[in-house]
Amino acid sequence: MDNESIFWRDLSNPPLKLDRGKGVYLFDEAGNKYLDAASGAAVCSLGSGNSEIAQTLKEQAKELSYAHMSKFYSQALADWTDQLISVSPDNLTKVHPVSGGSEANETAIKLARKYHLERGNSKKYKIISRATSYHGATLTALSLSGKTSRQEEYAPMMSPNPKISPAYCYRCPYNRDPDKCSLECASDLERAIVQEGESTIAGFIAEPVSGSSAPGVHPPDRYWGKIREICDEYGVLLIVDEVMSGMGRTGKWWAIEHSNVEPDIISTSKGLGGGYVPLGAIIVHDNIHKAVKDGEGSMHHGFTYGGNPVCAAVGSKIIQIMEREGLVGRAASMGERLLQSLRDSLGDHPYVGEIRGRGLLIGLEFVKDRTTKEPFEKSLNLPRRLRQSCLNHGLYVYPGGSPVNGQKTTQTMIAPPFIIEEGHIEEIVNSLLKSIGEVFD
Ligand SMILES: Cc1ncc(COP(=O)(O)O)c(C=O)c1O
């Protein structure tokens, strides 16, 4: 055994050892081939083994491998932040680099607090988030999340952040029709602000298209207009967590762009480094930067690997390739085809409740009964069993889902690399059909 020294996440269920990856495929040490229909965890947007990116990594590592941001920075960092700004909403003009999604969210909420302090609103510190959400594994990001199974053991260490209703039309907590509703789920933000005390709320954080907690779930686009209005009325910063939905995954650079709403902060990661390097960022509205600049002029915050030149160089190369190859548009068009194909093949399946998504961030929700939407028992462990069955059929999918309105749900995320082709879509759907048959029937 060559793995005795690894402290596994799940000690009773060690993962498969992979040897290599090429394009949309991964190969294990026994030579088995898997179509990576989840891009790892919606990370490897450009697929594996890209030689241009590997070359960039090598060259930058030889040139300058590290620069601590307290005193140094690199040309690679300057180039990457410029490029990131060029694909971001107009008034989001500054990037603070980090190494992952939890780091990005921690940074975003600390900056929200800092912004209010600089403006003399020292009582504003609470961050509101949504039930049914995931914002990261660090304690505050986890406190903001709605994944109760991950929080239970750490309950005494969780910070008591207020939560509002999820924007989850399939299981609408208000039993409304999404085409006709008055966006009660958005109004719930106003209720929470007023209840908690307007003068205490620093920000609201949410995923524009949900990731692992509710793959592919997204509210009607008008939801975000209402959220923006409420945030503006009460002086609350709007932070969109685009750790998973950003960098083109939903068919636009940022999922919030589907609604024409400009947030105050975008936190992002995953596709930023594409699986080649750990890379994350917050992209910040000019007004927030100005408040800090005109105020104390310092954030009292930073991570050792933030702004790493090798990661930044890879980040630049990824944006360059995405623009050259039109990969954001490709995520939109291939996403539509994949969604349609899944609906054509599985839409009438007795245990498939909903197939939804945007671009290449797609989720399947399984139910015991399509009429009542009754979920399966947690003890059946269906998302993981489905993942295993898919692996047996040469396909990798990501188990998802968290409680909605207090009920455990069974969901799976399909989020393949943007370079997938028609034939891969067929392969995904065929393997899924076989596995769903095996596991559910
Ligand atoms: C929406 C969202 N936010 C935050 C995170 C946390 O990112 P990381 O695991 O890189 O810390 C994730 C990870 O899955 C995520 O999907």
Image (spheres, rainbow, N blue to C red):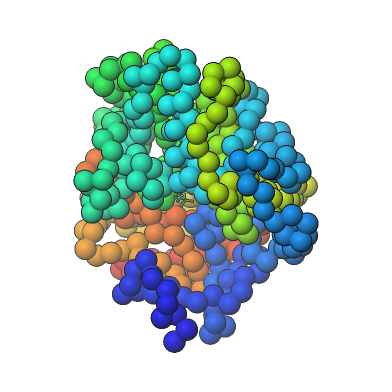
Residue nearest the observer in this picture, 380 or 2: 2
Q: Residue at x 52, y 54 (%)?
A: 42
Q: Nearest the camera: 367 or 114?
A: 114
**In this view, which residue lies farthest toward the bottom?**
1
Q: Answer with the quarter of the image where residue 45 lies.
A: bottom right
Please tell me in which quadrant of the rendered image residue 426 appears: bottom right
Q: Is residue 223 visible?
A: no
Residue located 51% across and 73% down the image: 394
Q: Is residue 187 left or right of residue 358?
A: left
Identity of the residue drawn at 64% across and 50% down: 308
User: Residue at 34% of width from left, 68% of height from top?
Assistant: 10
Residue 334 lies, in percent from the top left, at 62, 51
- x and y, in percent, of residue 73 in the image: 69, 43
Image x and y of residue 262, in percent: 55, 24
Q: Of 417 and 289, which appears nearest the observer? A: 289
Left or right: where does residue 63 sit relative to residue 206?
right
Asked if one can make out residue 328 in the rendered structure from this viewpoint, the answer is yes
The residue lying toward the viewer, choosing from 315 and 7, is 7
Q: Is residue 290 above or below residue 348?
A: above
Tag count in the figure? 0
Compared to 111, does 414 lie above or below? below
* Residue 59 in the image: above or below residue 3: above
The quarter of the rendered structure image containing the N terminus is bottom left
Q: Please say if 90 is above or below 387.
A: above
Based on the displayed image, in which of its 4 quarters is residue 200 positioned? top left
Query: x, y percentage for residue 69?
Result: 62, 42
